[in-house]
Structures are given as C-alpha cells and as structure tokens.
Image (cartoon, rainbow, N blue to C red):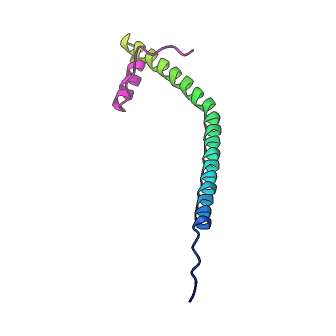
Amino acid sequence: MSEQKPVSLFVPVLLIALAVVVWSGFQASQLYQERANLSSLRTGQEATFSNAEKMRRQLDSLAAGTQQLASAGNKNAQAVVNALQQRGITINPEAKKPQ
C-alpha cells in the first residue's frame, strides 16, 4: 500500500504573494517616474504659457483700442473691426491694459 504525503500549499501561496509584491513595486516605480516626467514637462511649459498669456493681454488691449477708434469714427479702424467680425472674431472693448 502506498502512503500519501500531505500536500503543502505554503510554497505556491508564498510564490503568488511574492509575485504580487514585486508587481506592485514595479507599478509604483513606473508611476513615480511618470509623475516626475509630467512635472518636468509642466515646468518646461510654464514660461511659454506665461508668454502666451502676456501676448493675449496685449492683443486684447490692441483690439479694444481699435474698437474704440472705430467707435470714434476712424475709417481704417472700422474696416479692421468689420473684417474681424466677418471672420467671427468679437472684440471686448473693456479689455485690460497689458501689465
């Protein structure tokens, strides 16, 4: 008669637990690297973004001045405002002056 040896589940469970821990560590390191890369990209774009905001404020101020001239009767300014309106661009006459 053959004797059956009891099967131990310790080794398979230990291997699965170790695999889950290693996988979680790998995923955490990948996410950390992604976050660092995104942070450096954002830092690199801050100067460009601030320059674009400054340019937008200047353009809004220029357009508001052109609108004021057109309202005062300047023919050239009226032509510019009409051309912008035909292209679907609206002008906010209360635009703030660039800083």
Query: Quadrant of the image for the N terminus?
Result: bottom right
**Rendered residue at 59%/69% (across/down):** 8
Left or right of 23 in this view: 57: left
Closer to the camera in the image, 50 or 93: 50
**91 vs 20: above or below:** above
Residue furthest top as drawn: 72
**7 vs 51: above or below:** below
Instruction: Tell me, yes or no, whether the highlighted magenta stretch contains residue 23.
Output: no
**Rendered residue at 53%/20% (across/down):** 58
Residue furthest bottom as drawn: 1
Instruction: Tell me, yes or no, whether the highlighted magenta stretch contains residue 89.
Output: yes
- Residues rendered magenta in the picture: 76-99
**Rendered residue at 61%/48% (across/down):** 28
The spot of residue 37 in percent (x, y) is 64, 43
**Rendered residue at 58%/83% (across/down):** 3
The spot of residue 73 in percent (x, y) is 37, 12
The spot of residue 26 in percent (x, y) is 63, 53
Give the quarter of the image for residue 22: bottom right
Closer to the camera in the image, 36 or 25: 25
Query: Quadrant of the image for the C terminus?
Result: top right
Left or right of 38 in this view: 60: left
